Image (tube, rainbow, N blue to C red):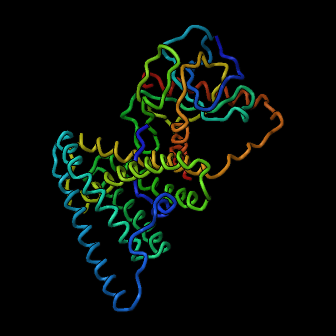
Amino acid sequence: MQLGCLDMPRQVTPPFDGGTLGAFFGESESVRINLVRSDEELIRKLVSMLDNQLLAVLETRSVAEFGETRAAIWPKYIRARRALADTLSNLASESVMEDISKLCFAMLKTDLQKQKGVRFGDKLADQAIFTVWTLGKINTLAHEVNHAGEPSDRDADLKLNSEYQACSLWAQFHLDAIVAAMKFKKTIPDDVQEVICDGLRTAINVHVILQEALDLRVPKKELPLFAMLPWDQEDEELLASSMKDINADFSKSD
Amino acid sequence: MPISLNLINQGEIFLCEPDPKDTVGSEREGDRPWVIMSIAPLHRGNCVVGLPLSRHTEKAVAHLIQVPEREITMDGKDINMDRVALTDQIRARDKTRFRRKIGHISPRAIKAIPLGLDSLFGR
């Protein structure tokens, strides 16, 4: 399946990576204030840089042009995105960032609902809303992974991490593109919307990858063993009913 | 010929005849590929739970999960292609109505489809 990536949940990074930059702030008040100010300035610059990159892809008018532009800006986008994530994590605590994320997801979902049929087609808006919802699930799962201890297979875990990073960024990029389109009131050609939908779908892959990462950390639970459960006439009738309506649902449609 | 009732596992794809009034036997045009989502230890009676895999990939949006060709393995001559798991069509299936097993989806696809179901069920 095409697994994609989204938000790169912050908590997922530490178990895989060596740490974050800027871990030694705070020797004096003046130093702290200067550093925070420089961080804020850096955030503005990074956001502006990301906006410019995303605007470049939003100016494209065909699938081929979109693909070429995306490929051209991709390395810069990755660097800017990671720098932004690191800087934000220096400025705010984990709990504050989580609260902000939840607020952003809720606002984004509302904004996307409003754009349905206006700036985007229904399909892209629906996929984006589903992606935002998936991000919430990803964050929850990432939290579980990070508190589940050591993986049973380190090599397999590293491979998953690599897939996770790639898929997360891919999905994030396409979600960012939609947000930028709303921010700068850009329209997206229909066929490019399809490509963005594909990119957003990668969030599903991220969720799957995290499930696999959790499986490496938490032993499989034994299934409950049931005695032979009864099967009666009511069950038989319900099952027959479930089979009968299939024609109505699928005739000529598969 | 109907398949053995004991050989149905999660992730397997079966052709299912669309109308129980039809005679079980030769394959017919209306057969649909269904992927089994329930796990074998919890199957009761002849009932399994599955959902149809559509070849209309334009349906893949939100909780209707796309299953790319590379995540599907076909056993025989059946053509492999991208499919869409119609999660909102999940339902009980009578396993005596399955004509034959035609393949299976990957463990990753098995993990992906429940995300669509979660969304459908508001979880």
Q: Residue at x 40, y 38 (%)?
A: B60
Q: Quadrant of residue A7?
A: bottom left
On the rendered structure, is A35 left or right of B53?
A: left
Looking at the image, residue B14 lies above or below residue A36: above
Most foreground residue, A111 or B108: B108
Q: Please state the horizontal and vertical placement of residue A210, each as a whole percent of the image.
A: 52, 50
Looking at the image, residue B123 lies above or below residue A34: above
Identify the image quadrant of the C terminus of chain A.
top left
Report how many numbered discs are placed on residues in the image.
Answer: 0
Looking at the image, residue B112 lies above or below residue A135: above
Q: Please state the horizontal and vertical placement of residue B15, each as a whole percent of the image.
A: 55, 20
Q: Residue at x 66, y 25 (%)?
A: B8
Q: Please state the horizontal and vertical placement of residue A46, each as a whole percent of the image.
A: 26, 67
Q: Quadrant of residue A115?
A: bottom left
Identify the image quadrant of the N terminus of chain A.
top left
Q: Residue at x 49, y 35 (%)?
A: B86
Most foreground residue, A215 or B100: A215
Q: Please state the horizontal and vertical placement of residue A122, each as a whole percent of the image.
A: 33, 46
**Residue located farthest toward the bottom when viewing the structure as drawn:** A29
On the rendered structure, is A38 left or right of B43?
A: left
